[in-house]
Image: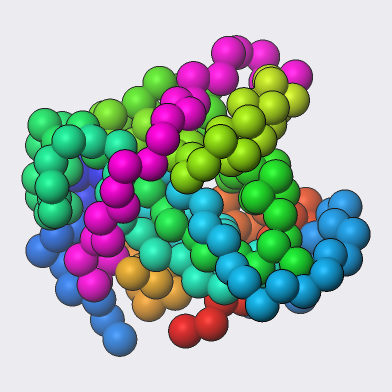
Amino acid sequence: MKQIFFALLAISALTVSCSRADQPTQPTNSAMNNPEPKMPATNKTEFADLGGGCFWCMEAVFERLPGVVSVKIGFAGGTTENPTYREVCTETTGHAEVTEIEFDPAKISYAKLLEIFWQAHDPTTLNRQGADEGTSYRSIILYRDEKQKLLAEKSKLEAQKDFHHPIVTEIVPLKKFYIAEDYHQEYYDNNSSQSYCQVVIAPKLEKLEKKKIIQQTPQTTK
């Protein structure tokens, strides 16, 4: 889990503390593979709600996609109202770490976001991504309507052929998204030199950049 990882780093006198909640924020172009056909502009945006382990990681990936307007990170999928990060870490709220992605469907589709979602994490590990372990790190898609549900189910079936083990990603209706504390937002961009960012997030971004899945610099509007 990130908490254990941070504790070990703190003992080694590194920059990341054992609890992310105690660490305040301190205030890189390649084209994507298989670009989508141009769709008529509608001047409307839509939302996708996805969880694939640490929300710092997922935020850093999705904000580097053309067509993504903004990315907020928070919690969803549980029962506790207005949860704090500390509460979610206790594994008693039922919530997962989630990214709320606002996107322009004229530039990138929900289906395309799901396609990238499968490549941005390992959807075959139950309640775990790397050293981050617990139900808050589970792979989850939270749909907002029947159309998103059907697209998610179809995408999951199509993605399965790329994995040797069964995909364990939950597909559930979104009841409510709770935004995380301010210092979590845009975390990688504000703290890219910190140990967790260097060890976990930077290699993920580099891998996706080499595959021309994401661009080097954030595309979202701040």
Res. 176 visible in picture: yes
Side of 83 where 193 appears, left or right: right
Q: In the image, is residue 190 above or below residue 166?
A: below
173 part of magenta stretch? yes
Q: In the image, is residue 40 above or below residue 94?
A: below
Residue at 90% x, 59% y is 37
4 part of magenta stretch? no
Residue at 25% x, 55% y is 178
Query: For this rendering, which residue is in front, 36 or 20?
Result: 36
Q: In the image, is residue 137 above or below residue 87?
A: above
Residue at 23% x, 72% y is 182
Q: What is the residue that sits farthest to the top in this orientation?
A: 165
Side of 213 where 73 appears, left or right: left
- Look at the image and give the residue range highlighted in magenta: 161-184
Q: Where does the N terminus fall, quadrant-wise?
A: top left
Query: For this rendering, which residue is in front, 77 or 115?
Result: 77
User: Residue 100, image x and y in percent?
Assistant: 43, 57
For residue 156, what is the image quadrant? top right
Side of 125 where 11 appears, left or right: left
User: Residue 74, image x and y in percent?
Assistant: 30, 55
Res. 131 visible in picture: no
For residue 32, what is the image quadrant? bottom right
User: Residue 171, image x and y in percent?
Assistant: 48, 28
